[in-house]
Structures are given as C-alpha cells and as structure tokens.
Amino acid sequence: MPALIIAFLALLFILWLIGQPYLTERKRQQIRAQPFPAAWRDILKRRVPYVRAMPVDLQLQLKQHIQVFVAEKTFIGCDGLEITDEMRVTVAAQACLLLLNSPRGYYRNLRQILIYPYGFLVNRAQPDDSGVTHPGRQALSGESWSQGQVILSWHDALQGAAMPHDGQNVVIHEFAHQLDQETGAANGAPILARRAHYARWSQVLGAEFKHLQARTSHHQSSLFSDYGATDPAEFFAVISEVFFEQPQRMATEHPALYQELSTLYHLDPLSW
C-alpha cells in the first residue's frame, strides 16, 4: 500500500510538472487580453519617451509584457520608499524591451525588484594597486543577483528612461545581467537560440571586449563605457544599453557586434 501511495503521489507530481507551463501561459494570455490601463498609458507617455518611437506592433507587445511583468514580479520599496504604479510601469517598460519578439519568457529566475530612492551602498572588497583587497563600501545605482533579485535606484531608473539616447540605462543593464544569469553566474554568454551561434558570439564579443580593454588602458574614448572593460558580463550589459539607445552609432562603428545583439534580441532598433 505505501508503494502505491508513493507511486500515485509521484504521478501527481509529474502531471503537475507537465501542466504547470500550460497553466502559466494560459494565465498570461488572460492578463495580456485585458485592456491596458489608461493611467499606465499616461505613465508611459510621461516617463518612457522611448516607447513613442517604436512601431505600433511593438508598442502593443510591450504593453502586454508590462501587464504580465507587473502581475508576476514583486516590487519592494527600500529605505522608506513606497512603491507606486509609476515605479512598476516605468521599470517594467524598460525591462521588457529585452523580451520583445522573444520566446524566452519573463526572466524566469526573477522574483523581486528592490527599489531604493537613490543610489545604495554595498559592502564590497576593493583591491589596491598591489592587488591586495581591503574591505570597503561602494555606491551603486543597480545590481542583479542570481538568487532572483534586481536592485535599482529609482532616481537612476527614472533618469535612464527620460534620456533614451545617451547609451546609459541602469534598468537595461541590470536586466541584461538577469538574462546572462539564467544559466548560473553571469559570464557574458546568455542563452542563444541555437548552439551553433555560440562560436560566432564568442568570436565577435571576445574581440570587441579586448578592443575596449585596450582603449580603456590607454585612456582612449569609446562608444562603450569603460565599465564594460571590467569583465565579459559587464561588457554584455553595457553593449545592451548602447544597442537599444544608440543603435545607429553601434551599427556604424561596430557592425558585427550590432548584428550579434540584433540576433539575440530579435530586434533591429535601427528601423524604429
């Protein structure tokens, strides 16, 4: 009898595993079918001017993604910050840019978005010139954790949305890290559509990363922030910011890199 009970429970668990994706997608379809709230449209108009430049079909798709994202993810205010729909929609609009035309889902590992009013301090060891590390504190505008959390400064998230062509966007940056972390620690290699794509990805991004490191070490200017020269994970997040905000310059100055990101994100912002 105990063996039959165990077998029955195992069968129920298997059926749940099989049915859960279907139930999740059905619920998402119901959310996407609901009218986009008028108050949220006003928030997009005031806070996320980037959206107005997008083709109509992508605007509709983005709004549907925002509805699902806000319904599924928990927003938590820190340092006394009270979370509002303005914060949810503004952050979600930027985060969901990375999901357009893609079957990758809604950041499957992400559970919570923690929002501080301004930059926040973290304890982080810093190396000195001799390579010895010392305890210290660092001010950040955003951080992505593989344990299912993204931390953002509301001030910087708002500024990033208001200035859509400067190539700097903390929300895009941190959510690019989330994509990168879907297979573990961020390493600059998010999940690609096909295994055969990784060789080209590694070749193009590896060469561009080394080029940025060389320019940074010689204090030469670049389209990409020097922070991208820190490691491959930061390089991927930095170039994702530029891909969405300065596609013309990126396509002109770094055509192979632009093509890799266009393939990854299933988008061509040049056409907007």
Image (cartoon, rainbow, N blue to C red):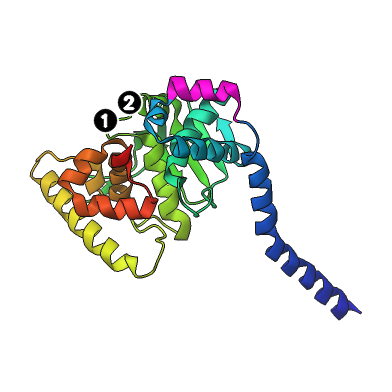
Q: Is residue 231 visible?
A: no
- Measuring 52% from the left and 26% from the top, which residue is drawn there? 87
Look at label 1 and name its amino acid: Asp
Q: Which residue is mark 2?
A: 163
| In front of the other: 3 or 106 | 106
Q: Is residue 204 above or below residue 251?
A: below
Judge whether residue 38 can be spotted in this image: yes
**Figure quadrant of the C terminus:** top left
Residue 225 location, x and y as percent?
22, 39
At 35% from the left and 57% from the top, the residue drawn is 187
Image location of residue 29, percent across then percent down = 64, 46
Residue name at image x 42 percent, y 60 percent: 191
Q: Which residue is mark 1?
A: 166
CA separation in Å, label 2 and label 1: 6 Å
Within-10-Å neighbours for mark 1: few <14, some 14–19, many 20+: few
Q: Check if mark 2's residue and mark 1's residue have beta carbons within 8 Å.
A: yes
Dot 2: within a 10 Å radius of its alpha carbon, few (fewer than 14), some, or many (20 or more) residues? some
In which quadrant is the N terminus drawn?
bottom right
User: x, y percentage for residue 112?
Assistant: 56, 41
**Closer to the camera, 62 or 146?**
62
Residue type at numbered disc 2: Met
Query: What element does badge 1 sit on?
Result: loop
Please give the label number shown on residue 20.
Answer: none
Q: Which residues are magenta?
A: 36-47
Please name whichever residue, 38 or 242, is drawn nearer the observer in this view of the structure.
Answer: 38
Total number of numbered discs in the rendering: 2
Q: Position of residue 249 (x, y in %)?
A: 19, 39
The correct choice, above or below, for 116 with respect to 133 in the image is above
Q: In the displayed structure, does residue 33 sit left or right of residue 187?
A: right
